[in-house]
Amino acid sequence: MTVTHLTRAMTPWKPVTRLAVLLMALIVCTAATAFGQDDQEYKRVYNAAIEAAKAKNYTEAYRLYTQAATLAEQAGDQDVVTSSNRVLAQLEFALSQRSLKQENYEQALKQAEQGIARNPEYAGNYYSKGLALKNLDRIDEAMDALAKAIEVAEASSDRRIASLAENAIREQFTFLASSALTRNGENIRRSDAEEALAHLAKLEQYNIEPDADVYYYMAEAYAALGNYEQAVAMADQALEVHRGSRTDKAKIYLIKGEALMNQGDATSARAALENALFGQYRQRAQYLLDELGS
């Protein structure tokens, strides 16, 4: 029996543009270390940088924080150097995200790397670097950068960046698996199924938990290989963690129902296929139910 499947476009990696929110949190902290006007030049520049950032004049803030860091380094004030670099790293992150949105990937990469140099303990720039490298088709480097984003984010309890980087890695390998399975239309070749499983297996290398889509494509691949028991097991895993639409859930029931049919379990197949009678999967599910008979 032919195994059906769905071509699923990869979810684009959306840049995060929250420049004002990112900076204001840091400005509140750095403002506490502002200095009186009778202090050294670097302190006056530092104060001016804080005010420019508060006024959302980020171009001027970037220039002034850069100048403050340089002057403070010369004066031996490491606190101001560190504080300035922390803000500059977040500015580079925001700028790199903006460049990603504008599809200027080389610029995004440059900005992310500058941000990493400013503050290697800030995870956002590793995430931006990974997205830029991915869009430049430097996939292995992209995955390494995203893995580093997760590592740094977890060390700093930045769950948001860790989650974004995890999703980006997961989506990449899910996309590759989906592409392999749809390469020859509905006739999934053994080599394509094995390739798909190999792509999905790489998630373990990065300690990325599978989601419903990962389990679904594993079910498709195992079904194409004739391993129907494993296909059913993966479909059940997909259903357990599924949080998407009813249509997505219907496709999981469909692949489960087909695998059960191939196992000769008509009763269980019928129950699964009845749950697949929805949206674009209704016609195929009904056809298979008719084949099963009453």
Image (spheres, rainbow, N blue to C red):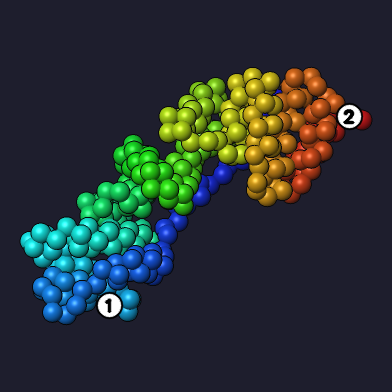
- Circle 2 sits on which residue? 293
Residue 111 seen in the figure: no
The quadrant of the image that shows the C terminus is top right
Measured from the top left, where is residue 123 in percent x and y? 35, 49
First-in-chain label (2 vs 1) = 1
Above or below 213: residue 191: above
The quadrant of the image that shows the N terminus is top right
Measured from the top left, where is residue 104 in percent x and y? 31, 59
Total marks drawn? 2
Above or below 226: residue 220: below
Q: Which residue is depicted at the point 74% across and 22% down?
A: 262
Q: Which residue is depicted at the point 25% across and 61% down?
A: 83
What amino acid is found at the position of numbered circle 1 in the picture?
A: Glu
- Circle 1 sits on which residue? 51
Q: Which residue is depicted at the point 78% across and 34% down?
A: 272
Q: Is residue 293 left or right of residue 246?
A: right
What amino acid is found at the position of numbered circle 2 in the picture?
A: Gly
Measured from the top left, where is residue 70 in percent x and y? 12, 63
